[in-house]
Amino acid sequence: MEGREEGDPGYDDWFDEPEPPQGRGARSVFDDEDAWVLPDDGPPPGRRTRREPVVIAGYEIGTTQLAVVTVSALAVLLAILAGVGVFNSGSPRPAAQLTRSTQPPPTVSPAVTAPTVPSSTTGGLTQTLKPGDTGKQVTALQNALTKLGFSPGTADGDYGPATQVEVEKFQAANNLGVDGVVGPKTLAALRKALSG
């Protein structure tokens, strides 16, 4: 703002100090609490001039040492929490999923099937069955169980829980291993019961 002087209404100098008000009753803008510059006669009351060390358990620790200890403690705490899995967004995965297996997949042996017998004498049962199987053989099993006095429910061709329970009852009644699976021994016992 060149060319303007102090009395000019557009004069603006940020570095000029305002003049104290004159006259009676005028409040001074230079009170101690409004001063921008502290007096040179020492620190204000209640303030320390020198930082005193913090005393913990009888040991003096400087502020720098205190900061280092605090940051170290926080780092250790975060490492522990991360190790426990607090910061994972999902449920922790089992260890088996974290490592890759180097073993080849297990070989599956073919199911042992009973010899085929004409369906007229066995009610259509010609193969072994297990829970979860579906199809005509399961329907034949359900019909055979019903014929023998067991109640596997509707013959729908689904080897579900009701069919499994009735197979277990048949196995128990015929002194077979009770596992709910129509294996070779259970299949033979069913055929024998149906033909007799």
Image (cartoon, rainbow, N blue to C red):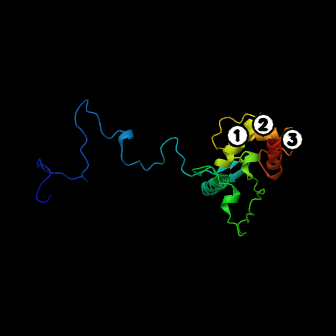
The amino acid sitting under disc 1 is Asn
Q: Quadrant of residue 176?
A: top right
Question: Dot 1 corresponds to which residue?
Answer: 143
Secondary-structure class at tag 3: loop
Viewer-nearest of discs 2 and 3: 2
Viewer-nearest of discs 3 and 1: 1
Distance of mark 2 from mark 3, alpha carbons? 12 Å
Asked if residue 156 can be seen in this view, the reply is: yes
Question: Dot 3 corresponds to which residue?
Answer: 174
Between discs 3 and 1, the one toward the N terminus: 1
Question: Dot 2 corresponds to which residue?
Answer: 148
Q: Is residue 54 left or right of residue 171?
A: left
Distance of mark 3 from mark 1, alpha carbons? 18 Å
Residue 10 image point, x, y percent: 12, 50
Q: Is residue 170 left or right of residue 104?
A: right
The amino acid sitting under disc 3 is Asn
Residue 170 image point, x, y percent: 81, 39
Residue 53 image point, x, y percent: 63, 51
Residue 50 image point, x, y percent: 56, 52
The amino acid sitting under disc 2 is Leu
Q: Are marks 2 and 3 in contact (CB under 8 Å)?
A: no
Q: Residue furthest right?
A: 175
Q: Is residue 193 left or right of residue 107?
A: right
